[in-house]
Amino acid sequence: MSTLNRGLSRPPAPGVRALVADRTDTAAVAAALAGQEWDAVIETWAWAPRVVRDSARLLAGRTGHYGYVSSRGVHRRPWPAGGDEGAPLVDGNPHSTDDADYAAAKRGGELAVLESYGERALLARAGMILGPYEDVGRIPWWLRRLEKGGRVLAPGPADAVVQYIDVRDMAAWMLQCAERRLGGAYTVTGRPGAATIGQLLQTALEVTGFDAELVWASEDLPRREGVWLGMEFGLRFPHDPTPTGMHDADVSAAFAAGLSTRPLRDMLAGTWAWLQAEGDPAPRPDAPSPGTWLDSAAEQRVLDQL
């Protein structure tokens, strides 16, 4: 197994051969890949589609399968309730050098892979990805907030459904697809209704043993106070307080193709074990600041009204 990246974030796993190159430098990537063949490729690039296009072209004759980690974001908003892989898509350009529009960039990446691999391409349209090494800061932020204890403002209602995929389950499924040479587009996330925000946060308390009290706020009060807690899980957004289609995607195709998911408790325990062992991840430059969701002063202001 080989990895190709700049080699800056952390060393490769034991037994993995590290190929080092800046993905935006086509000549450097070509040099790193020269004279080698692989059974399959797993691609995670999320920015300018041109980078995916160049890599796919370089590898098209030397690999039998290309698995691209795409996103449900390639579907045009508003997302339909219960939408599946056939829901309308945004426009994308596989030759674009623009990475400002995440949805368009991911769709462009899909088209870039299809251009070189056709039916040999797997487009894994991920939902919310959680688990160890999650550097967007959703679960890590919540675990650190619960660790502080006291009264904790929680984004109600507690029975709001959250749909997510543990990164380890997604990785395992994509490797199985590579072995089977499975192509096509799939919505890859957990089953709708499998977990609620209340179950997520209560289980986090049980896994960690923290002494904190969850105080559930209605949707209206945080909105009136300009607090967008819940945005981290896609429960609401400043421009869309009650988004549709976020947590009820039809995932029957992926589960029929062998996807399986671990219990909520395992996802939270794995994330907490990683944070304890390695510390908080460096924030992604393209991720929202956790202060966007909630700061201590805003939290106390809302708690005082509850």
Image: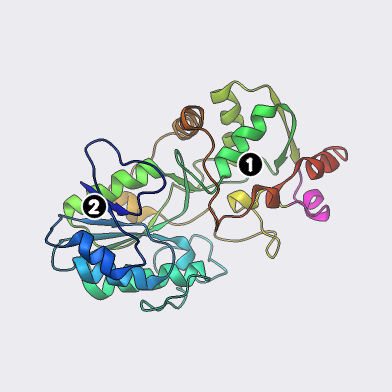
Q: Please tell me which residue is depicted at 22% across the width and 59% down the height of the picture.
A: 32
Mark 2, secondary structure of its residue: helix
Q: Is residue 304 left or right of residue 235?
A: right
Which residue bears the numbered disc 1?
Answer: 159
Mark 2–mark 1 Cα distance, whole angstroms, equals 34 Å
Q: How is the image coloured?
A: rainbow
Q: In the image, what residue occupies the spot 47% across and 56% down?
A: 249
Question: Horizontal placement of 101 versus 222: left or right?
Answer: left
* Residue 127 covered by magenta stretch: no
Residue 161 at x, y percent in the picture: 57, 46
In the rendered image, which residue does mark 2 sit on?
177
- Find residue 204 and report its horizontal and vertical position in percent: 57, 30
Q: Residue at x 40, y 79 (%)?
A: 93
Above or below, 147 against 253 in this view is above
Q: Give the farthest residue toward the right.
A: 305
Q: Point out the stretch of residues depicted in magenta.
A: 217-227
Q: Earlier in the sequence, mark 2 or mark 1?
A: 1
Q: Amino acid at mark 1?
A: Asp
